Image (cartoon, helix red, strand yellow):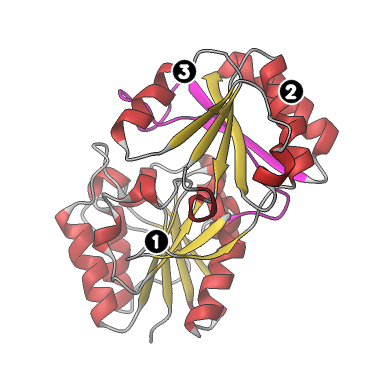
């Protein structure tokens, strides 16, 4: 049997240090050699995932920005995107700035030459500054939207968001959901920071076009590969994996996953810092990974 393995990065394939363990690398390589396709699906961009992409084949697919983009893993070439309409982007930027934050517009860099446009004059959060220093990201600043903003943004904005304290972002998330919940998907959770990979009090608000999620783009990836969607095996831990784990024929939750992910998963593996991906993939290759399967840190079902 073969099909498509889709794995999240942070809290899933990456350990607490943000690295892919040797056992995880070996398991994904064995899956590829056995005829399985392997794809990464993450909230990061392709550029922000450069340190982890080498664990999958050059011709594999990469699902980025929470499902808003699909790339060739090796080259980063963009294959498909789902963007937010320019007028809505500007409405969101105005609202975010009005609440004292800098708006982060994540762009399709293949069209713009830069990854982010930061709109406004508020100070960037410390977590954002650290993230920019850690990755080869190109940015552009707008103190205010220019006259030709619609033209510059049309078909190019994958995500709108900002980063700040949880208590400061909560009212903003609620307001956006109430105003535009039928047109947009808005999410907020702990951001990856210099000190914490999971559970941070610094939160990230992300806003997407309504139907953007990892599962939808995983289906696009499967179709491009000529793989039956019924063979998709998905691994994840966070709320942006909810649709992926819930809809995949075999959704596998990490032991460290959010309770809502664990509740809908059909199988359960060890934590991200205990080679949980490798343990599940090894079981898959041995024919043991089925609905109801559960593993401890040592890999025993």
Find out whether residue 202 is within the magenta segment.
yes
- Label 3–label 1 contact, CB within 8 A: no
Identify the residue position indicated by label 3 in the image: 125
Q: Quadrant of residue 2?
A: bottom left
Find out whether residue 185 is within the magenta segment.
yes
Label placed on residue 95: 2
Q: How many marks?
A: 3
Q: Nearer the viewer, residue 58 or 213?
A: 58
Identify the residue position indicated by label 1 in the image: 76
Q: Give how far across and how far down residue 214 sits, in percent.
A: 55, 57
> Vertical placement of 101 versus 158: above or below?
above
Residue at 58%, 15% in the rendered image: 121
Residue at 39%, 61% in the rendered image: 76
Q: Does the rendering let one see residue 223?
A: yes
Left or right: where 170 falls relative to 274? right
Give whichever of discs 3 and 1 has the lower sequence position: 1
Q: Nearer the viewer, residue 22 or 122?
A: 122
* Span highlighted in magenta in the image: 184-213
Dot 1 falls on a residue whose secondary structure is loop
Q: Give how far across and how far down residue 160 sits, in percent.
A: 62, 37
């Amino acid at each position: 049997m073969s099909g498509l393995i889709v794995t999240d990065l942070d809290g899933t394939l990456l350990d607490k240090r943000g690295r892919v363990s040797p056992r995880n690398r070996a398991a994904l390589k064995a899956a590829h050699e056995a005829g399985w396709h392997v794809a990464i699906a993450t909230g990061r961009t392709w550029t922000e995932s450069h340190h982890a992409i080498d664990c999958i084949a050059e011709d594999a697919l990469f699902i980025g920005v929470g499902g808003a983009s699909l790339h060739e893993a090796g080259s980063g070439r963009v294959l498909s995107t789902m963007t937010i309409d320019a007028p809505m982007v500007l409405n969101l930027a105005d609202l975010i700035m009005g609440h004292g934050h800098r708006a982060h517009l994540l762009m399709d860099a293949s069209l713009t030459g830069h990854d982010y446009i930061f709109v406004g004059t508020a100070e960037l959060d410390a977590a954002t500054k650290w993230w920019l220093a850690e990755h080869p990201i190109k940015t552009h600043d707008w103190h205010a939207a220019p006259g030709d903003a619609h033209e510059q943004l049309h078909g190019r904005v994958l995500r709108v968001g900002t980063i700040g304290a949880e208590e400061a972002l909560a009212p903003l998330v609620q307001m956006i959901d109430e105003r535009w919940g039928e047109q947009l998907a808005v999410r907020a959770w702990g951001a990856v920071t210099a000190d914490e990979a999971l559970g941070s009090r610094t939160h990230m608000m992300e806003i997407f076009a309504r139907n953007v999620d990892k599962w939808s783009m995983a289906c696009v990836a499967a179709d491009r590969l000529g793989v039956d969607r019924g063979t998709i095996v998905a691994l994840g831990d966070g709320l942006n994996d909810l649709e992926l784990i819930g809809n995949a024929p075999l959704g596998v939750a990490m032991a460290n996953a959010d309770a809502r992910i664990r509740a809908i998963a059909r199988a359960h593996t060890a934590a991200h810092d205990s080679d949980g991906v490798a343990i599940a993939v090894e079981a898959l290759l041995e024919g043991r990974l089925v609905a109801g399967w559960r593993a401890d840190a040592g890999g025993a079902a």
